[in-house]
Amino acid sequence: MNPTVLGIGIGAFLAFMAFAFGFWAFLTAVIFMAAGAILGRATEGKLDLRGVLDAITGRRSSS
């Protein structure tokens, strides 16, 4: 699927959530979508969660 079409679909979903259910439902949907995206990238092997955690906590790697 084209990334532009996917982005439009996600934007439409988030707009629907904001208008239909209010700000907190919108924010909850955004959080769950971000968590799903992160877990999906990690499952595909395109994201190193340990490296992300090290970057967040300020640890450096020599590799």
Image (cartoon, rainbow, N blue to C red):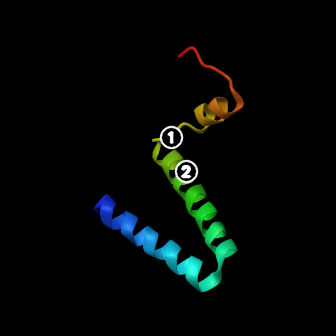
x and y, in percent, of residue 53 in the image: 66, 35
Nearest the eye: 63 or 13: 13
x and y, in percent, of residue 19 in the image: 56, 82
- Amino acid bearing label 1: Leu
Report the residue marked by disc 2. 38
- Amino acid bearing label 2: Ile
x and y, in percent, of residue 60 in the image: 63, 20
Q: Residues within 10 Å of mark 2 (few under 14, many from 20)?
A: some
Residue occupying image coordinates x 28% and y 61%: 2
Mark 2 and mark 1 residues within 8 Å of each other at the beta carbon = yes
Residue occupying image coordinates x 59% and y 31%: 51
Q: Residues within 10 Å of mark 1 (few under 14, many from 20)?
A: some
Residue occupying image coordinates x 48% and y 75%: 13
Question: Taking 47 as reference, is 9 left or right?
Answer: left
Question: Taking 17 as reference, is 7 left or right?
Answer: left
> Mark on residue 47?
1
Q: Quadrant of residue 62?
A: top right
